[in-house]
Amino acid sequence: MFLTVENVKKSYGKGDAAVKVLDGVSTQLEKGKICTILGPSGSGKTTLLNMIGGLDTADSGKVVIDGKQITGMDPVELEQYRREYLGFIFQFYNLIPNLTLRENIQVCEYLSKESLDIDELLETLGLTEHQKKMPPQVSGGQQQRCAIARALVKNPRLLLCDEPTGALDSHTAQEILVLLEKINQKYGTTIIIVTHNTVIQEMSHKLIRIRDGKIIEDSERTDLRPASSLIL
Amino acid sequence: MVLNKRIFRELKANFARYLALFMLITGGMFACIALSSSADSVVTSVKDFMEHSNVEDGCFSVFVPLSDSEIDELCSSGAEIEKQFNMDMLSDDGSKLRIFQSRKAIDIEHIDSGTAPEQENEIMLESSYAKAHDLHIGDSITLSGKTMKITALGVAPDYDFLLENYTDTAANAEKFSIAFVSGKGYSLLRDVNKDSSEEFLYAYTLPENMTHAQLKKLLDGSELNIAETDDKYISELIDRLFGTNGQFSDTDFNNISFFMQRESNPRIGASLAKVGMYHVGGIITGAVILILFAYICSIFVIGTIEQESQFIGALYAMGVHRKKIMLHYITLPVVITLIGGIIGTVSGCSPLGRGLLTSSVIGPYSVPQVKDHYSVWLLVYGILMPPVLAAAVNFICLRRKLNTEPLRLLRKEQKESRLLNIDLHGMGYFNRFRIRQILRELRITAAMFGAIVMGVLLLMIAIVTYVCIDDLAGKYENEIPYRYCYYMKYPDVGNIPENAEACYSKSLNYTYMDFTLQVTVMGVEENSKRFPFEVSHDKNAVSVAEGTAVKYGLRKGDMFCLHDDVVGTDHNFKVDSIVPYSAGLNVFMNIDTARELFEVSDSCYNMLLSDEELDIDSGRVLSVTTRESMTSAVETLLSDMMPMIIMTGVSALAVYISVLYIMMKMMIDRSAFQISLIRIFGYHSNEIKRLYLDGNTLTVVISAIIALPAAKLIIDLIWPIMVYNQPAGYACEPRLWHYAAIFAVTMLCYYITNSILMRKIRRITPAEVLKDRQ
């Protein structure tokens, strides 16, 4: 199994003020699959994503990726883990404003010896003609495509997407989902998408539904719909 | 307003930044106020002293003392004349004291402590001499075998700068000073010292309607009363010159050996001239610090507004007035700078600041105990200028930024700069990233550049001052071609002692930047062994010593006009050549040419140079100067300047570290989100440092490379002002290693700051991005 999450618990605050965010979460994911994590605000889905991404630490439990247990790693090991394995896509793109789109992608190209060809990525994502522009000079959809290109350029084994369409209109959101699907098929990248949008589950191989820090549904899906057919 | 609770939280959150800003203001105001108030106190004390002591308008000395009737005649014109006869005596430790009788009317000595000498065996020592020799009231001092009891310590206004000779470069109270005795005491010492020469000096003050020239004219008519002196040497001289004995008219022999107005006297008011410079220096230092501070402040404001634009937009949208928001943002910098200004001003006025600098300012001078003087406008400048400036800068920046519509603020929309979009295609990734970062933080880069220029300038001033004076001491040691220099009391035509070289010298005045110094015209022998260079044979041309040429910016072919106070004429000399000699201020010509120019006999000389002590009757000698004493005086000047040199150097380091730290930290704070983001991508701390901090290396290196020649240019402009009252030419030529040392110190300060901030980078975690997300 590519990803194993085993009885992960996480609380914020102390004593009476302590809030359980994850309460014994366990799940698994095969390599090359798309997984959607659904849940209302405050359910713990982003916290789970952060645990997998090595951005947050669990109070107890294990997260194992590709045979490596990342819970318990020190900050330097976590840095190396993120460098080798992960790509991140955020809701608000988080592009570096004083770098051109191409330069933003190069920020992550530098991290991998087996990086993908930037020109090909730009072409695939429809950014070739905008590559020399600064982020504020392009639309939200183009910024998110750039963020995807940035996440993909180092050819990560696991792509973590936190509300990747949350800030986009439905048409652009669909374009982004089509891209993610294409990437999954073309590069075999494992993708985890955290979202409020229940429609996205229809293009995913696996669905995890969280509520109050507990997984209430963990199911494999076989009746996948192509992203281009989703009505967002 | 509830919003203001945020002020304390802002202070807590950015404590290091505000602390550095506070230190910059406190340190800057401390230096400014300490320098200026020390200078103010010295100026006030010295001016009061000069007024109360009835400082002379001028002085003159004669070969033969004036008769009482002549003095009465001069006084009848309204002038006041007082005899200030004096003689040099050696103490047991070899130091020289010029002994005067206590004065009653002009240049009255000031007693710092003790009581005026009344008995014949009592003496008042000049305070800095007593300090240098650890002598106190009640102690004794032996002069030519005669033991005198010290009853007082004090100073005299005509020896503010304790120069043994008017043409000396520096004073050294350990080797030479003055002392006062009663009338009986003077007679007693004259008796035990009768073989040595006595200077017949008179000080004068003029009524408002009388000029120096008018007094000089009256003096020119004075007679040579041989009967007035028991000095056998003047009688011999007159016999030799005129073959007779008796009274002469002014057409035969001018009794005045020198005539000097107060303005031309380097011993009087030298401290005022020097201190005035410190005063201006203090104000300029404060102004530069305030300008730098204002700029840094504006960067803070703009940065804060950009960072908090959404929050401000939200307040706007909800109807909060711009005035209230502005007041909220202005409060903290104004309070911080007000406290910084108060502490800087108070500590600058305290014994710590004022005491430290006063000793450095008055070090080489003999002035009365300095009384603290508080200038109201200086206190207002120190306390109110920083907060007023902070308020003004914040107001201007905030007003511009807060004029933006709420929606633009909410969306964090910022004006795009074309500069940010420049094409860096073909450049390596890291370099491109760094250049983009520099362009993004152009204001910060500019502040760093300003700080580096200022730091380099201060360091260069400190190093150049030290090296120039140190070099001068070395040059004195190597270039002064004699061990002993005998100034003859009367122009001599006798045989020149074996192993000595005779010169004919004349001191003339040169006024530069409204300050008059004496330049010695040295007539030297043909093929002189001691001055092995070609000198002018034309009485309208001179060979200018290198030091003099440096001081007055003279080049071959220039005209150099010197004034003769005694005769009242100008000499327009053409610069014939520049010759390698740095001691004092001198120009050279052939001795025969000099004799012809100054209308003295063919074999006349008034100066003897020798490598060994000469066996000459001390009565013929006015004073003796040694190479050792001249070198030692320059070394003393250097030690007097050390506190100022150290303070300048330390100020440079303080400016470097505080401004670089504040600016680079701000750069990191502004990039915290980005740093956190790329940390999420897997960048290591060292790589983040390469991206975000190492770009500054380029800024610092380029700034230092530009600042070094720029500082040299600035120093070239201000150097003549800094040394305008020094009777020597200091070549301001930093060497390659000086530039290298300044560059190395700059880089070291940068690397120290960089290392401190590396800890800050390590503390930025991926959580920054998550915070923003959540």
Image: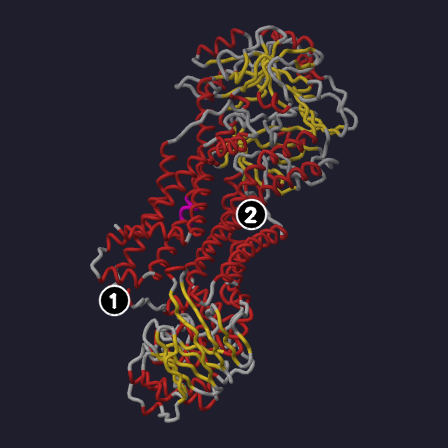
Local secondary structure at mark 1: helix
In the rendered image, residue B46, in percent from the top left (x then y), is placed at 47, 25
Q: Is residue B544 magenta?
A: no
| Residue B281 in view here | no
Which chain hosts label 2? B
**Considering the image in quadrants, where does the C terminus of chain B appear?**
bottom left
Q: Kindly identify the amino acid type of the residue bearing the numbered disc 1.
A: Leu
Local secondary structure at mark 2: helix
Q: What is the magenta segment's predominant secondary structure?
A: helix
Which chain hosts label 1? B
Gap between marks 2 and 1, in whole Å? 51 Å
* Residue A105 image-quadrant placement: bottom left
Mark 2 or mark 1: name the one nearer the start of the chain: 1
Side of B184 relative to B308 (left or right) = right
In the rendered image, residue A171, in percent from the top left (x then y), is placed at 29, 85
Q: Which residues are magenta?
A: B287-292
The residue lying furthest to the left in this view is B319
In the rendered image, residue B477, in percent from the top left (x then y), is placed at 70, 36
Vertical relation: B674 (above or below) B11: below
Vertical relation: B586 (above or below) B118: below
| Residue A125 in view here | yes
As rendered, which of B558 and B95 lies closer to the eye?
B95
As rendered, which of B172 and A232 lies closer to the eye?
A232
Neighbourhood count class around disc 1 (C-alpha, 10 Å): few under 14, some 14–19, many 20 upward: some
Q: Which mark is residue B460?
A: 2
Side of A92 relative to B445 (left or right) = left
As rendered, which of B238 and A201 lies closer to the eye?
A201
Residue under label 1, please give it. B407
Vertical relation: A2 (above or below) A80: below
In the rendered image, residue A8, in percent from the top left (x then y), is placed at 46, 73
Q: How many marks?
A: 2
